[in-house]
Image (cartoon, rainbow, N blue to C red):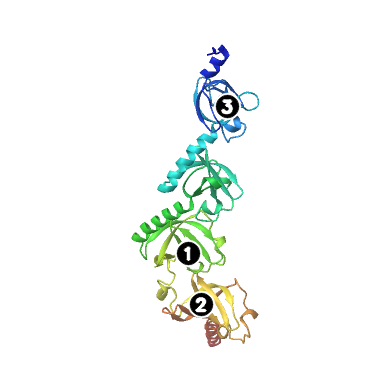
């Protein structure tokens, strides 16, 4: 039996390793772009920056120190320069995938910061394992710009787990939908018609404004924005504005809102304010061929029929009146139930002429 040489004994004292094997080592040197490990093998192990982390340009000397112990996976026993090429991030990703598999099976809610904004969604990392959240699953509403999520910590669940196809899909939308449904349930349980509630203007359209009441949206229709006329809701409300509204109606999950509070109803004292025989001033709001509508107060319009404009013949109201013109007329009819008021300028002319005639008669007698 031949004796082993010193070199052969030294060779056999080192363990053997294979590609894919997991090894433990001690950091003996750190450079900005690589880590050198003593792994108890005849050659040192090398972890390059790209095999340590997915973050580009990171300085490894700020993360790892000589003397640290690390566990890594063998990529190549000989990298061509007699060293063992190791990976830290892939081993961590494998462990991360196992973590994500458990989360997927248990429907666990995960939390992580957004590391990257992609064209079709967001990327987050859990224990070095990447999770992709498609744009359609980021929110329960359409998100035009995803950049606001950069570095923001978000919650999500794993909705698809297929690491072999590199498909680990996260879903934030279902969490938001579930929480919104819970808030809706709580709100509908206590909300009643006639309640006054503060909300936030969420969206403004040509026909009204959607008000967020705290997880539930209500519609404030243009016709309910004021006792008077509102031509353009976008000139009245701004997104984000706080507003106190009246719950007018609740039908299933739809809520109709109003700003027509009873105490501000301009018809509340109509019998006194618009009594027949009273002379009143108003502005011409709009005209038709049969007459002009005069605004006496916000929400109170009266009809000045073409036959009541003047004692002289008038073909069309627009021949003698203009929109915005202030006129003085006499109330000749009031229908509170139908909210209709009729005016007459001719009646004032007749009264004025009667006074002038009486004055002339007195002068002649003298």
Looking at the image, residue 263 sits to the left or right of residue 237; the answer is left
Relative to 295, residue 179 above or below: above
Camera-side residue: 344 or 119?
Answer: 119
**Circle 1 SS class:** strand
**Residue behind mark 1:** 220
**Residue behind mark 3:** 60
Looking at the image, residue 50 sits to the left or right of residue 270; the answer is right
Can residue 214 be seen from the camera position used here?
A: no
Relative to 128, residue 42 above or below: above
Q: Position of residue 233 (x, y in %)?
A: 54, 63
> How far apart are labels 2 and 1 at the CA level?
26 Å
**Residue behind mark 2:** 302
Neighbourhood count class around disc 1 (C-alpha, 10 Å): few under 14, some 14–19, many 20 upward: many
Neighbourhood count class around disc 2 (C-alpha, 10 Å): few under 14, some 14–19, many 20 upward: many
> How far apart are labels 3 and 1 at the CA level?
58 Å
Tell which circle, 3 or 1, labels the residue nearer the N-terminal end: 3
Residue found 57% across the figure and 79% down from its top: 292
Camera-side residue: 58 or 230?
Answer: 58
Relative to 104, residue 83 above or below: above
Q: Nearer the viewer, mark 2 or mark 1?
A: 1
Residue found 40% across the figure and 47% down from its top: 106
**Circle 3 SS class:** helix
Residue found 42% across the figure and 48% down from its top: 105
Q: Position of residue 297 (x, y in %)?
A: 49, 70
Tell which circle, 2 or 1, labels the residue nearer the N-terminal end: 1
> How far apart are labels 3 and 2 at the CA level?
81 Å
Residue found 61% across the figure and 49% down from its top: 119
């Amino acid at each position: 039996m031949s004796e082993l040489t010193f070199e052969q004994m030294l060779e056999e004292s080192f363990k053997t390793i294979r590609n894919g094997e997991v090894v433990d080592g001690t950091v003996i040197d750190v450079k900005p772009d690589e880590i050198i490990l003593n792994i108890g093998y005849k050659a040192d192990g090398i972890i390059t920056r790209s095999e340590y982390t997915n973050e580009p340009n990171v300085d490894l000397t700020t993360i790892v120190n000589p003397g640290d112990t690390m566990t890594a996976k063998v990529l190549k026993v000989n990298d061509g320069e007699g060293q063992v090429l190791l990976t830290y991030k892939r081993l961590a990703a494998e462990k991360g995938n196992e973590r994500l598999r458990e989360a997927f099976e248990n429907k666990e809610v995960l939390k992580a910061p957004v590391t990257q904004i992609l064209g079709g969604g967001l990327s987050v990392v859990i224990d070095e394992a990447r999770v992709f959240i498609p744009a359609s699953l980021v929110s329960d509403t359409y998100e035009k710009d995803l950049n606001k999520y950069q570095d923001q910590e978000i919650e999500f669940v794993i909705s698809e787990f297929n690491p072999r196809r590199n498909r680990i899909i996260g879903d934030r939308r279902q969490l938001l939908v579930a929480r919104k449904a819970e808030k809706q349930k709580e709100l509908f349980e206590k909300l009643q018609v006639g309640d006054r509630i503060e909300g936030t203007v969420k969206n403004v359209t040509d026909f009204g404004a959607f008000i967020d009441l705290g997880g539930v949206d209500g519609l404030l229709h243009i016709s309910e924005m004021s006792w008077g006329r509102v031509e353009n809701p976008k000139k009245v409300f701004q997104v984000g504005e706080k507003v106190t509204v009246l719950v007018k109606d609740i039908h299933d999950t739809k809520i109709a809102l109003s700003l027509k509070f009873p105490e501000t109803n301009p018809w509340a004292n109509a019998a006194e304010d618009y009594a027949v025989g009273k002379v009143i001033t108003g502005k011409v709001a709009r005209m038709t061929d049969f007459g002009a509508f005069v605004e006496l107060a916000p929400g109170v319009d009266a009809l000045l029929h073409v036959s009541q404009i003047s004692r002289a013949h008038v073909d069309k109201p627009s021949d003698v009146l203009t929109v915005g013109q202030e006129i003085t007329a006499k109330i000749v009819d009031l229908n509170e139930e139908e909210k209709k008021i009729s005016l007459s300028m001719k009646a004032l002319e007749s009264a004025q002429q009667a006074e002038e005639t009486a004055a002339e008669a007195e002068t002649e007698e003298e």
